[in-house]
Image (cartoon, rainbow, N blue to C red):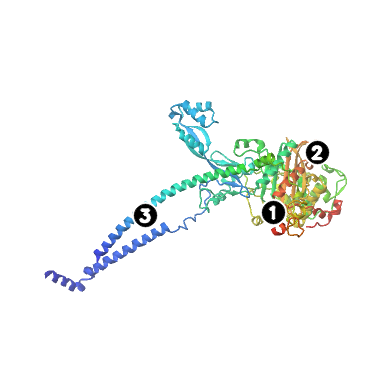
């Protein structure tokens, strides 16, 4: 009885040892992979930080304004040009934009009603 | 047989010789030990498995420690646009002792990094007694790979973290700067290292990703900041002012939406910031603000109940106090109503209010509005107000029109915001703050009724008074101008002035407070040789508001001025429609 138990235990130990060895080998492999990946992640993060900084520099208002002055020839906004959504239909000039397709007389073709 | 007999004997004898010698009992005992061991190992195994596989929820729950080494967080504006970040840079160094062929090394280096100076490089590489010289700080990863592939002996790379401010000068005085070892030396960068250390640590802790702590969100809106900066630059140039400064404050939350002080500096190159003229004029210095303080005096008269819209003040002749005489700059030389004292900026009227109320109540009111304390914000740049030594009649009179008391411009803006927002004084902040949180430290300083009357007076000043040039149609701007004579060598100089304008918009439901300061603006033909605030600071503030109001979502209205009817200010004493 005792021999049987010992035998089973020794066998179990051997099986466990092999299993553990395999497990450890695999986990080392995975660890290596993790190290490589986290190194890559770090690299990518640094790259992202660099690109973020570059994006911020490229979209800084100073640069955008310089470009706008150079290429767009816009005038500054007047308060009278800001209107509410409900007034949009009154401001569309004749013959500009979509004409009333559903015949309700609204020059914007009911777009503002749809938005609302 | 003997053996059997012995065994029989043993078995037979067992009950008499005690349990200890019973072989069956020995087996039982061994089994017990065996079971105990198996159980023990199973327990250990289970716990090991649990620790390896299971989550360790409680371990992460450490207390926040302010001095734990945390990476400097990024700083963004209120909508997440990056203002300060860390960039890993590689720096190239050399060990001159190990360089074999100096000429070849120089040729290769200058060939691949054209901005390197060959003569300087030669000097560095021929210093044979040195083991370390920097060749170039901050090269890109691509350049590093390239140089690495050249395989020049004696060259090496070192990783460094550099603090970068991608927007350059924008918001420099709010952000501050760091030294070469990334320690904050000024502005919010200083705050993150010192008083705000716990705050900085908290950005890192709940975040499992330790590589990038959460960004610090400023109250600043970068677009508003830029607009303010540009308009102040233009104004400073136009009026040849020594300096210009401005601040935009959210009236309801106390957030500083924008703060500019010119001349400024580039935080990427902090040596520039050392200049004496580069101080932060909004929080780092105190100034006599002049007539803008009359808004405070009038608020005091209204709130303490010694004056109302129909109270009159005799400004028909200069006021004599002891040996001093108080004049009006824009003298009307007649009896003025309280609104007229405000919009014509009568020194005499304001002085009369202060004399009537008495020293104690005047001091208590000024203290309530925070003018007696050194203001505390996140910025380390802060200055204590300069108050009169004694509160005699003349001091009380001059304080009423903003002379003899020097305060931080931000203090005035915060007090102005309190007068406009319904009477609540809210401590200013440079960090993003919820409106609900702002309500907690808010303190009532004047009644809602006084605030309503002040809004009317601010609007009236822009419609009919000294601040007419600040008006931008549609945005219902209200405000008060102020021009103080500057003190040079302990004396007031008539030719040097500090012009400022304290305004808010839209006055029917104020949301933002704007303060613009021009230091010593010069007269122009266009301003009819005037150097008072109404001709320079007020129109500048108007232009600032015209630019920032659409960004801040203030909808222009063109029909509201019916709320301000009548021709004479006296006739307008009726309550205003909200």
Disc 2 target residue? B527
Cα distance between the residues tagged 3 and 1: 62 Å
Q: Does residue B140 appear left or right of residue B336 in this picture? A: left
Question: In the image, residue B563 lies at what x, y percent?
Answer: 81, 55
Chain letter, disc 1 residue: B
Q: Which mark is residue A23?
A: 3
Residue B275: in sight, yes or no? yes
Q: Nearer the viewer, residue B519 or B214?
A: B214
Identify the element where label 1 is drawn.
Answer: loop
Residue for point 80% across, 37% down: B526
In the rendered image, which quarter contains the C terminus of chain B?
A: bottom right
Cα distance between the residues tagged 3 and 2: 86 Å
Mark 1, other Cα within 10 Å: few <14 / some 14–19 / many ≥20: many
Disc 1 target residue? B252
Cα distance between the residues tagged 2 and 1: 35 Å
Question: In the image, residue B170 lies at what x, y percent?
Answer: 64, 42
Identify the element where label 2 is drawn.
Answer: helix
Q: Which mark is residue B421?
A: none
Q: Does residue B294 appear left or right of residue B248 in this picture? A: right
Identify the element where label 3 is drawn.
Answer: helix
Question: In the image, residue B442 lies at what x, y percent?
Answer: 67, 55
- Residue B546 lies, with reference to residue B263, above or below; the image says below
- Residue B141 lies, with reference to residue B373, above or below; the image says above
Between label 2 and label 1, give the one nearer the viewer: 2
């Amino acid at each position: 009885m005792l021999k049987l138990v010992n035998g089973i235990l020794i066998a179990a130990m051997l099986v466990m040892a092999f299993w553990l060895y395999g497990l450890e080998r695999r986990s080392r492999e995975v660890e290596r992979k993790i190290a490589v990946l986290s190194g890559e992640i770090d690299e990518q993060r640094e790259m992202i930080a660099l690109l973020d900084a570059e994006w911020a520099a490229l979209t800084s208002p100073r640069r955008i304004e310089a470009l706008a002055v150079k290429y767009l020839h816009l005038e500054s906004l007047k308060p009278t040009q800001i209107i509410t959504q409900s007034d949009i239909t009154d401001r569309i000039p004749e013959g500009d934009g979509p004409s009333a397709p559903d015949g309700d007389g609204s020059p914007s073709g009911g777009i503002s009603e749809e938005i609302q | 047989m003997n053996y059997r007999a012995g065994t029989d004997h043993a078995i037979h004898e067992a009950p008499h010789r005690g349990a200890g010698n019973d072989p069956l009992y020995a087996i039982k005992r061994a089994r017990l030990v065996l079971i105990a061991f198996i159980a023990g190992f199973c327990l250990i195994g289970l716990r090991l498995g649990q620790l390896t596989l299971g989550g360790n929820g409680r371990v992460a729950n450490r207390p926040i420690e302010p001095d734990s080494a945390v990476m400097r967080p990024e700083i963004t504006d209120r909508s997440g646009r990056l203002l300060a970040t860390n960039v890993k840079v590689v720096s190239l160094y050399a060990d001159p002792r190990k360089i074999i062929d100096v000429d070849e090394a120089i040729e290769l280096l200058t060939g691949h990094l054209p901005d390197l100076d060959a003569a300087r490089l030669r000097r560095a590489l021929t210093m044979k007694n040195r083991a370390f010289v920097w060749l170039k700080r901050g090269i890109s990863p691509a350049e590093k790979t390239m140089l690495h592939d050249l395989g020049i002996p004696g060259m090496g790379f070192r990783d460094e973290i550099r603090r970068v401010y991608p927007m350059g000068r924008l918001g420099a005085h709010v952000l501050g700067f760091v030294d070469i070892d990334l320690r904050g030396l000024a502005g919010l960068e200083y705050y993150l290292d010192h008083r705000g250390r716990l705050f900085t640590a908290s950005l890192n802790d709940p975040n499992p990703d330790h590589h990038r702590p959460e960004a610090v969100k400023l109250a600043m809106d970068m677009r508003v900041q830029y607009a303010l900066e540009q308009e102040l630059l233009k104004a400073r140039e136009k009026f040849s002012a020594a300096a210009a400064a401005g601040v935009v404050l959210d009236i309801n939350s106390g957030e500083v939406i924008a703060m500019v002080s010119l001349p400024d500096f580039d935080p990427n190159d902090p040596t520039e910031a050392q200049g004496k003229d580069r101080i932060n004029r909004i929080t780092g210095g105190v100034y006599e603000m002049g007539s803008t303080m009359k808004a405070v005096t009038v608020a005091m008269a209204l709130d303490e109940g010694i004056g109302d819209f129909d109270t009159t003040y005799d400004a028909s002749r200069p006021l004599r106090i002891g040996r001093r005489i108080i004049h009006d700059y824009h003298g009307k030389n007649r009896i003025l109503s309280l609104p007229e004292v405000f919009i014509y900026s009568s020194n005499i009227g304001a002085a009369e209010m202060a004399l009537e109320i008495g020293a104690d109540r005047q001091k208590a009111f000024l203290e309530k509005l925070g003018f007696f304390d050194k203001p505390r914000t996140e910025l380390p740049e802060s200055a204590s107000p300069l108050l009169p030594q004694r509160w005699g009649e003349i001091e009380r009179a001059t304080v009423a029109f903003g002379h003899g008391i020097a305060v931080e411009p931000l203090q005035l803006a915060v007090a102005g915001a309190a007068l406009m927002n319904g009477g609540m004084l809210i401590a200013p902040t440079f960090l993003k703050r919820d409106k609900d949180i702002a309500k907690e430290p808010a303190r009532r300083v004047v009644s809602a009724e006084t605030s309503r009357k002040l809004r009317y007076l601010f609007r009236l000043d822009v419609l009919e008074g000294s601040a007419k040039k600040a008006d931008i149609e549609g945005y219902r701007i209200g405000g008060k101008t102020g021009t103080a004579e500057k003190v040079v060598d302990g004396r007031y100089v008539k030719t040097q002035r500090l012009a400022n304008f304290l305004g808010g918009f839209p006055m029917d439901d104020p949301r933002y407070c704007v303060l613009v300061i021009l230091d010593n603006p010069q007269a122009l033909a266009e301003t009819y040789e005037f150097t008072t605030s109404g001709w320079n600071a007020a129109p500048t503030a108007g232009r600032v508001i015209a630019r920032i109001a659409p960004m801040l979502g203030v909808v222009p209205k063109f029909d509201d001025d019916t709320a301000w009817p009548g021709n004479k200010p006296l006739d307008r004493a009726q309550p205003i429609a909200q």
